[in-house]
Image (cartoon, helix red, strand yellow):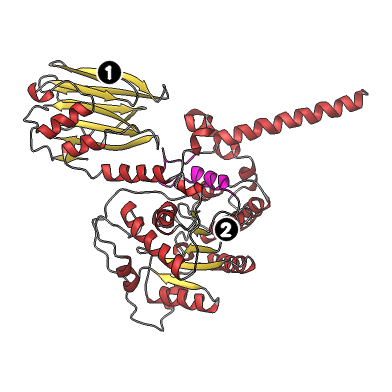
Amino acid sequence: MPKKVKGIVRSVLFLGMLISMLSAVNQILVPKYIYANSTWPTTSSYQQFYEMRENSIDVLFLGSSVCVNAFSPQEIYNLYGIRSYNLGSEQQSIFLSYYWLKEALRFQNPQAVVLDTRFLMTIHPESKINTTEGLTRKCLDPMKWSRVKAEAVKDLCTIDEAQSELSYYLTNIRFHSRWNSLTEYDIDLSRIRHAELKGYSAIADYNEYPYEPFELKEPDSYKDFDASVNTLMMEYLNRTVELCKENQIRLILVSLPGNKMNDGIHNGLTRYAEEHELDYYNLCEKQHYENIGAVLPRENVIGHENLWGSIKMSQYIGKILSETYGVAAVGDEQWENTEDYYTQIIKNCELTHISDFAEYLKAVDDSCYSVFISVQEDAGGKFSDEVKQALKELGLKIDVSERPGYSYYAVLNPGEPVIEQISKEGLTRTGSFRNGRSVYSITSQGAEAGKKAQIEIDGVEYTVNKRGFNIVVYDHMTMRVIDRVRFDTKGDNKNAVR
């Protein structure tokens, strides 16, 4: 082989190796947002979208975090058989919604798109694209490279000159400092596949504040709409309308309860929908709100909706999609196979509101859970037969009720022998679980040993640290701690503190 040809071959091989190395470095350094570390896990949600069978999604939801929490594709499928996916993300501006719709159309041919209008209004006046740079990256970084992403990055950096187009191609420029804070999710990329909710994210908190639904008072007022609407977002809404028309997709605009709402905004969006032959549902409006039928505080549909509120909202929007727009039920194993995952998510949320000790012990008897127990000060008292039976069914053998003021801990990991110890002296134990991927440290100090309970998992302290049974529950399915609670067994066994 001539020297010149050998030189060309070596150069090509070197460039290939260099590109492969840079690609691997970029993939590792980009932050991963998954259920283990984020309320709005875009990395895993968008990755799952790319795994869906082509042309199998009939409805897409787009919008900000309130959209992510409101519309549960699994709930909609369970109720109506409608195959949907939630492509919302934290503070997703209309600019980003447009490009994710454009990206989605490379793989799917939906009948309808439901778009949250929250970020049509100016939310971030300091930002040219109406959202922060960090949340823009959280939305765009998981998108596959194609002409769509290249166009999005080019438009973004043309609009916002402070952002670097090159840093989206070579993300190590932006995230090089993460070398000293990498986690298992960065190195073992298979971990981020652990998401089966199709873009939805469940919140367990109740809403403790009253809500007054919107009632129109001035039908001819547009002042507040003209003052609040973001000109650039309107431009990309217009593009979204055209994109849907080109692809014969029904675009449905929605305003969710808790969105900024007044006469002007309602009238402006209604007028826009009429002018563009769209449908607009102002779900802040009293009629819609009452028809949703949510009962606060448990069924929160305000702002970031909780699990129970999203069930009501998904039922409402699913009925509209089915009866008004004729989106048909289609049996699909992609939704059938994730029903158990969704059921476990519901159980996780329910767990955080159980206040009865016996009921709680029964609930944590689950092969998905690791349970860590540490006694602070005193766990003695008269245990009910139900509590004693629940403790026994968990595999615990030591009767703490007969030893008031003692230190005590227990560790229950699925598939492993129960670990428990009791003493008048203080107790400490360290160990690992999840096949060594996670470590724990547990300390118990009874009445005469210091009055302290401490449970650390992967270096993070979770204990409530009050008198009685301090419990921390780790869910192996979502790979995170899902509850921390204290039961004062010197009281009535219902004195839960979180």
What residue appears at the point 54 percent right and 38 percent down from the top-left corner? Answer: 30
Residue 49 screen position, x and y as percent:
54, 48
Q: Please indicate, yes or no, whether residue 489 appears anywhere in the rendered image.
A: no
Residue type pointed to by label 1: Arg
User: Which residue is tagged 2?
Assistant: 101
Q: Nearer the viewer, residue 109 or 35?
A: 109
Is-magenta flag for residue 51?
A: yes
Percent position (x, y) of residue 374?
Answer: 21, 26
Image coords of residue 433 (percent x, y): 37, 23
Say what secondary structure mark 2 lies in.
Answer: helix
- Residue 361 part of the magenta segment: no
Q: Check the image and name the residue furthest to the left.
A: 382
Left or right: where 283 falls relative to 464: right
Which quadrant would the C terminus be assigned to in this image?
Answer: top left
Of 311 and 451, nearer the camera is 311
Q: Position of residue 101 (x, y in %)?
A: 57, 58
Residues rendered magenta in the picture:
32-53
Q: Residue at x 12, y 20 (%)?
A: 406
